[in-house]
Amino acid sequence: MTKIATPRPIRGTQDMLGETADRFHHVVDMFDRVRRLYGFRRVEIPVFESTAVFARSLGETTDVVSKEMYSFDDRGGESLTLRPEFTAGLARAYLTEGWQQHAPLKAAVHGPVFRYERPQKGRFRQFHQVDAEIIGAAEPAADVELLSFADQLLRELEIADDVTLQLNTLGDAATRDAWRAALVAHFEAHRGELSEDSLVRLAKNPMRILDSKDPRDRPIADAAPGIDDSMSAEAGAFFEAVTRGLEASGVAWTRNARLVRGLDYYRHTAFEFVTDRLGAQGTVLAGGRYDGLIETLGGPHTPAVGWAAGIERLGMLIDAPATETGSVAIIPDGATDAEAQTVVAALRRAGIAATLAFAGKPKRRMEIATKAGAEYALYLRGTDAAEPLNLVHMAKDRAKADAMLPTIRAALPGTYA
Ligand code: ATP
Ligand code: MG
């Protein structure tokens, strides 16, 4: 007989159980709570799009488009791509779904994204992002609102002290062109010391060298001219309005005059929230203003600003989330299955979390109840017994347990009350 081989999980994908999954969902829950406070609307968009959506809006020379996309031809011969990020798909939906009528559209979305990268701690091929965008707003106040949202999310997750907001501006078109020329001059002077990848970048997209993770490039990138000498008066005024707004909102930031973002469409504000607690994968949340993007998809000039954060990276930083609701473990100890099922259903309908320990001897069931972290163990002797039930307090959080007691008593079926 041939042994059947079990299929392996795909490299760079994750299966989550227990605390890892709890951390993941705590991040999503907090994101949803904060986005309501800021008036962002939930949207959903497809996991795949025409390859052109990403190729055109992200730019052919970006790492994402040139090396990281999961693209394939479907059975109809159309080239599709699993989304490597949310912004391009949102911009496509904004144009094709008539969402312009809602401008400025404050949109919040989360879900899986896909990039063919070298898997390591905090870097996956299927990972997940929470994402917030304001589409159709040119004012620096939109940048401030969006950054405040990010800052508050990190506060609610209780990691604000571990994460620093690094802020820069990429200026307007004139500023960007002038800075680009200054960077080219600098990198040309150090040609011989650059990595092969950066020599390609120098020809195609020199600003990307600033973003390089190759140790050979770092000293040259760190010594490169910052943007300030190239800044136009208008771009400078915009940046100042953003920083003033952040100060008024109580959002701490530091300047990083060499920060660029990996994608072509950024203008003006660019930022990253970074931590030193995740090694090389230190950027947890990043974004900026992308006033040119919608035009690359054939739409009208539409200023916009947004960010995305890796849910896994945030999940690795937070403390293990506490279980919020108390619970009762039902241990049949003489009662029939049906009697126990009646009781557990009644408790759950009353809003009390309840588990039914249905396997093994009462002692084994008690172990299961303890492991489940229940506030009470409810031994069910059965309706015919002299003492039909025994409610045993499991002494964890006495006050929490006492507070549950009236609800438990009220929820128990008549024969037990
Ligand atoms: P990095 O420099 O780490 O590659 P990036 O600049 O490519 O990040 P963005 O495109 O800005 O990342 O995506 C926003 C966020 O998504 C990142 O700050 C990070 O938290 C998360 N992220 C990006 N790539 C991955 C990945 N491969 N695995 C897990 N999280 C990721
Ligand atoms: Mg990347």
Image: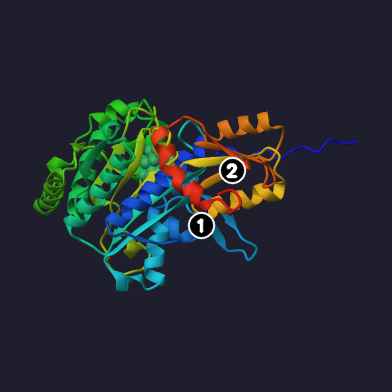
Q: Is residue 208 left or right of residue 393?
A: left
Please state which amino acid type lies under the numbered disc 2: Thr
Is residue 294 placed above or below 410 in the rendered structure? below
Is residue 375 placed above or below 64 in the rendered structure? above
Residue drawn at 71 percent across, 39 percent down: 334
Q: CA distance from mark 2 to mark 1?
A: 36 Å
Q: Position of residue 203 (x, y in %)?
A: 35, 42
Mark positioned earlier in the residue sequence (2 or 1): 1
**Which of pointers 2 and 1 indicates the residue nearer the eye?**
2
Q: Residues within 10 Å of mark 2 (few under 14, many from 20)?
A: many
**Label 2: element kind:** strand
Q: Position of residue 173 (x, y in %)?
A: 21, 54
Q: Nearer the viewer, residue 119 or 158?
A: 158
Q: Is residue 190 left or right of residue 324?
A: left
Residue drawn at 31 percent across, 36 percent down: 158
**Label 1: element kind:** loop
The quadrant of the image that shows the N terminus is top right
Q: Is residue 42 left or right of residue 395?
A: left
Q: Which residue is mark 2?
A: 355
Mark 2 residue's CB less than 8 Å from ligand 1: no
Residue drawn at 29 percent across, 34 percent down: 163
Q: Position of residue 66 (x, y in %)?
A: 46, 47
Q: Nearer the viewer, residue 46 or 201?
A: 46
- Disc marking residue 47: 1
Q: Nearer the viewer, residue 290 or 121?
A: 121
Q: Is residue 118 visible?
A: no
